């Protein structure tokens, strides 16, 4: 068996080394081949220029390691040579020595192959030298030619092919005598960087020629046309390499680069006729390559900056370089003042001594004289340089001197003159006195700026047009005795009383100035007058509303007025007290009724003080405390504090009407309470019998029917519990309640905004009509402005802020999966709805199909809950329901008591059916549950009876105290997260002793995930108005629907 095959040897070495070794083998130059069993090595001598000793050792073959050695210089440099090849070929003729078994032979072959490959890869390659030739042509093109090789430089005949081969690590043929072999040769990194740059020019198509980089003739293939966009970047690299620059018949070795400079100078002197001339020296010797923004001169590449290029282009355009440019007497000042500074910035300028003696350089003193006649303001402007006076509107006459003028300041002054509406009649400047706007602009806008650059000389007539001391407005606010009005008075210092009203009228009309009877103009553009304009705008005050400098506004504008007034202000004690009570209800000291049968917490005492503070000024507001903080108790405390002979009307949802009665009897038994409910006849009888009561409690549903009765009465206080019931301004209920006469009106709601800011506006139309602007204007207000308007009239506290001892509420999301049957139904309905919605949007009739689309969204949500909610005879299962029941069993086993909310009554039926199968007792409260039964069920559950309480999401959102539960399960998501918060608040409220866990069931990969994400995002707007606020989802926009359906 042979030790090594020749094909293996051939693969181990570069072709040229193998061929030379093969030649030595055939010439029988290998002598004395022997094998040492102990060292497991082959030894031989190879005849060459000298006799070289070769050693190939296998003593570490078991580790796959083989050592080769040769005495020749090539091996010393490259760890590989033709002598080793010749010896290996000789070894290949031998048979396996006795000591070699088949396994060892295989290891030997692998080892030597690995050794030689390693030797091959690690051998030192021969560097390729590159020479670059930059060819500058007079047609504004720059070419690059390359030569490369080892000992001899070969012209690269096709640049594109060369770059592709070299950069792809492929061989490239030059001649029959030489080829580039990536196994043997390499390019220095500096050259590789240049070659990669050239290749990128080709790939990105940065082509600067009509035909492209390459034409069809062979000569063009040798040349690379350099694109202007990359020229500077390229030659920055070329300057460090072996480069020759060729232009015409001239050659330059190496590259010198100069930035921000020009290779020529300027000289200003007199010619033979004693006339001033500008000369350009050295320009004729340069070559300007316009596309490259480069100048080549005497072997140097100049790259001027933009300013230098502009001058360069002007020199070429007007042919200044070929002849002297004359400088006339009329243009001498202009040249030395404007042109010469530019030339000095771009290059060296030499000025002859004779010319220097004629130059005067002194600072500018500009003067302007202003006077007035009956028709106009007249002005005369002049420039002074030492003793020389220049009329800017006339030609210069002096010929013996050259004045270096302050052109920048002169131009600034002239710009101000032009913008001042001055006219020039050939002799002087003038502004007609008949145009007050132009006179005002000049006196108050132009003149102060002119004063910074010009010495002004004003006659007394001009000075009389400007007030000596700026009139300052001031404001006073008083509370009118016995009314709900504030009297606001205005005064302006330095202005006669008979002119104040006219001046205020000018402010209201947003005039920029006012002309006093004296003729002086007063500017109304200062901050204080602007603040007055905002004051009048925000309070909708018109000129006719101001009487003798005074205006009256409702008292509820107090806090708003204080924020708006930015002038000097004076408040009477009553108004200061009002502001203090509005801004700091926690600092008030209204006595808590002694007959109250409850102990108020600190925050509840503050709520009571807030009620009383507003009530003292016949104002109302919204108590927007978080659910479970005792809004009812705070309100009852307030009602108990009011005179007992006054009648109060409390309007509540029908579901909590008896809750209110019970709370009143419990906490304020001295209140005489009448519940107005039942049939129309029964309600009429109850109202007739309730003459002695001082608190009437009725529902929103019945008050609408009985409004004709109520509007004939006068109530001391109107209380609206769960005021979101009147969130729609256009409903009959809202309209009916607005007809009820009450001195003070308060709303209670943990969610005063459920769907839009319009709901807050609608509530305030009831409790403080007039506070808000009309609905159209209100919609233009930003959240910050709305918050500023309503801040004194909304009191909002969160449970986590005031009930520090309240157990934690933990909110989690339980993700369930659709069953196979559910998924098939869901995907089918989703695709159908996506098609319908996309078609509606494309046809621009989304609103017309809105109800159909929203119904489709409801179908998708029902499929997530259980398909049988709308698909008859569905016999499959629901993944969510299965997981719910499994969780319910586990929770009950662990001693948990839970509320289960769903908005679909049919879903309750399905859940009840599963509970009964498991013999689990439950309470069930829905929209048709009588109020008395609601109270009884709640009390029984809180006393420990049964562990499961099923509730309709909407029916259970108000008036329930279910602190007996420690777990709240939201089986399906409601569009409005505020409703979900209310549901969770049934358990997480004052009186709760346990940590409450709120679990939202969401089906993976469905619309429920989208709804949840949308809920979280849409809270932010309302947070800016009511802290922390809720959000709106029931009014879905087209964009919302797109997102929900992934359209």
Image: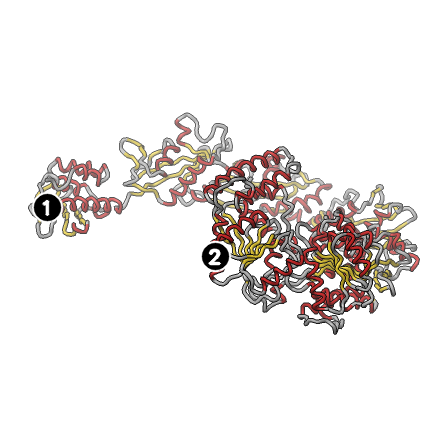
Tell me the residue at 81%/66% (across/down): 575
Residue 264, position in %: x, y? 56, 42
The answer to which of marks 2 and 1 sits earlier in the sequence is 1
Circle 1 residues within 10 Å: few <14, some 14–19, many ≥20: few
Left or right: residue 162 compared with residue 74: right
Residue beneath disc 2: 889
Left or right: residue 550 compared with residue 846: right
| Most foreground residue, 997 or 1005 | 997
Residue 304, position in %: x, y? 55, 43
Q: Residue furthest top?
A: 217
Residue 738 against residue 615 in the figure, above or below: above
Q: Quadrant of the C terminus?
A: top right
As drawn, the label of residue 101 is: 1
Q: Is residue 794 visible?
A: yes
Residue 104, position in %: x, y? 13, 47
Mark 1 lies on a secondary structure that is loop
Residue 674, position in %: x, y? 76, 61
Residue 489 against residue 1001 in the figure, above or below: below
Tell me the residue at 43%/37% (across/down): 134
Write down the quadrant of residue 455 in the picture: bottom right
As drawn, the label of residue 699 is: none
| Most foreground residue, 521 or 598 | 598
| Most foreground residue, 579 or 452 | 579
Residue 170 against residue 447 in the figure, above or below: above
């Amino acid at each position: 068996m042979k030790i090594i095959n020749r094909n293996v040897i051939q693969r181990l070495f570069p072709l040229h080394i193998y061929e030379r070794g093969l030649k030595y083998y055939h010439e029988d130059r290998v002598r004395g081949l022997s094998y040492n069993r102990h060292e497991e090595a082959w030894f031989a001598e190879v005849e060459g220029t000298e006799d070289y000793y070769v050693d190939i050792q296998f003593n570490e073959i078991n580790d796959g390691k083989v050592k080769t050695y040769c005495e020749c210089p090539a091996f010393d440099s490259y760890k590989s040579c033709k002598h080793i090849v010749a010896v290996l070929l000789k070894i290949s003729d031998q048979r396996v020595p006795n000591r070699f078994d088949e396994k060892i032979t295989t290891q030997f072959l692998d080892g030597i192959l690995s050794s030689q490959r390693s030797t091959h890869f690690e051998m030192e390659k021969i560097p390729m030298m590159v020479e670059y030739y930059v060819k500058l042509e007079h047609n504004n093109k720059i070419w690059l030619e390359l030569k490369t090789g080892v000992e001899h430089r070969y012209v690269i005949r096709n640049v594109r092919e060369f770059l592709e081969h070299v950069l792809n690590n492929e061989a490239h043929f030059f001649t029959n005598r030489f080829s580039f072999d990536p196994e043997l040769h390499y390019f220095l990194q500096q050259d590789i960087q240049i070659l990669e740059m050239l290749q990128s020019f080709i790939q990105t198509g940065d082509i600067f020629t009509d035909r492209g980089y390459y034409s069809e003739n062979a000569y063009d293939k040798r040349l690379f046309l350099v694109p202007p966009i990359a020229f500077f970047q390229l030659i920055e690299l070329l300057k460090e390499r072996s480069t020759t620059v060729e232009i015409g018949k001239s050659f330059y070795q190496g590259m010198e680069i100069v930035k921000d400079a020009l290779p020529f100078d300027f000289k200003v002197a007199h010619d033979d006729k004693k006339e001033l001339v500008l000369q350009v020296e050295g320009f004729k010797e340069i070559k300007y390559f316009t596309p490259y923004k480069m100048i080549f001169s005497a072997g140097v590449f100049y790259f001027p900056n933009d300013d230098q290029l502009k001058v360069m282009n002007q020199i070429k355009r007007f042919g200044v370089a070929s002849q002297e440019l004359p400088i006339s007497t009329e243009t001498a000042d202009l040249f030395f003042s404007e042109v010469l500074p530019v030339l000095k910035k771009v290059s060296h300028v030499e000025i002859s001594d004779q010319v220097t003696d004629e130059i005067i350089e002194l600072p500018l003193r500009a003067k302007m004289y202003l006077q007035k006649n009956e028709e106009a303001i007249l002005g005369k402007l002049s420039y002074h340089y030492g003793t020389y006076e220049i009329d800017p509107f006339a030609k210069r006459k002096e010929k013996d001197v050259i004045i270096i003028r302050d052109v920048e300041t002169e131009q600034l002054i002239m710009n101000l003159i032009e913008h001042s509406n001055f006219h020039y009649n050939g002799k002087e400047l003038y502004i007609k006195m008949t145009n007050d706007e132009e006179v005002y602009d000049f006196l108050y806008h132009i003149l102060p700026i002119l004063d910074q650059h010009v010495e002004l000389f004003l006659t007394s007539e001009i000075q009389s047009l400007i007030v000596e001391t700026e009139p300052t407005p001031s404001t006073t606010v008083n509370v009118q005795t016995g009314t709900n009005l504030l009297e606001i008075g205005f005064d302006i210092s330095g202005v006669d009383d008979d002119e104040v009203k006219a001046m205020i009228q000018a402010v209201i009309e947003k005039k920029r100035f006012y002309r006093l009877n004296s003729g002086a103009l007063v500017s109304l553009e200062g901050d204080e007058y602007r603040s007055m304009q905002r004051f009048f705008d925000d309070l909708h005050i018109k000129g006719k509303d101001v009487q003798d400098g005074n205006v009256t506004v409702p008292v509820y504008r107090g806090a708003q007025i204080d924020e708006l007034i930015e002038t000097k202000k004076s408040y009477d004690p009553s108004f200061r007290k009002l502001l203090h009570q509005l801004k700091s209800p926690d600092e008030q000291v209204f006595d808590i009724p002694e007959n109250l049968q409850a102990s108020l917490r600190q925050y509840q005492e503050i709520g009571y003080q807030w009620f009383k503070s507003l009530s003292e000024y016949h104002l109302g507001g919204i108590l927007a405390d978080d659910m479970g903080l005792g809004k009812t108790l705070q309100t009852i405390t307030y009602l108990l504090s009011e005179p007992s002979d006054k009648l109060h009307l409390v309007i509540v949802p029908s579901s909590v009407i008896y809750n209110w009665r019970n709370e009143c009897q419990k906490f304020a038994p001295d209140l005489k309470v009448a519940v107005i409910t039942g049939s129309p006849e029964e309600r009429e009888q109850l109202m007739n019998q309730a003459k002695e009561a001082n608190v009437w409690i009725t529902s929103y549903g019945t008050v609408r029917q009985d409004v004709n009765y109520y509007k004939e009465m006068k109530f001391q206080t109107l209380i609206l519990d769960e005021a979101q019931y009147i969130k729609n301004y256009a409903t009959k209920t809202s309209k009916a309640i607005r007809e009820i006469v009450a001195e003070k009106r308060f709303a209670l709601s943990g969610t005063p905004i459920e769907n839009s800011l319009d709901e807050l506006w609608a509530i305030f139309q009831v409790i403080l009509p007039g506070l808000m602007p009309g609905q159209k204007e209100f919609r233009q207000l930003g959240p910050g402005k709305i918050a500023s308007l309503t801040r004194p009239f909304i009191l909002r506290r969160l449970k986590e802020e005031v009930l520090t001892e309240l157990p934690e509420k933990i909110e989690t999301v339980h993700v369930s999966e659709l069953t196979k049957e559910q998924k098939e139904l869901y995907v089918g309905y989703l695709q159908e709805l996506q098609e319908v919605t996309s078609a509606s949007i494309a046809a621009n009739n989304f609103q017309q199909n809105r109800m159909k689309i929203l119904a489709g969204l409801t179908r998708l949500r029902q499929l997530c809950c259980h398909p049988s909610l709308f698909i008859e005879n569905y016999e499959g299962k629901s993944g969510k329901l299965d997981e719910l029941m499994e969780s319910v069993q586990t929770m009950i086993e662990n001693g948990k008591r839970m509320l289960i909310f769903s908005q679909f009554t049919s879903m309750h039926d399905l859940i009840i059916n599963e509970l009964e199968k498991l013999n689990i007792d439950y309470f069930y409260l829905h929209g048709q549950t009588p109020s008395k039964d609601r109270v009884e069920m709640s009390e029984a559950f809180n006393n420990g009876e049964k562990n499961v309480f099923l509730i309709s999401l909407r029916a259970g959102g108000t008036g329930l105290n279910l602190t007996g539960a420690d777990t709240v399960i939201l089986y399906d998501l409601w569009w409005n997260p505020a409703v979900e918060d209310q549901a969770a608040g049934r358990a997480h409220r004052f009186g709760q002793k346990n940590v409450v866990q709120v679990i939202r069931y969401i089906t993976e990969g469905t619309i429920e995930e989208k709804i949840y994400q949308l809920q979280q995002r849409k809270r932010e707007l309302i947070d800016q108005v009511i802290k922390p606020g809720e959000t709106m989802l029931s009014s879905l926009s087209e964009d919302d629907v797109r997102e929900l359906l992934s359209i």
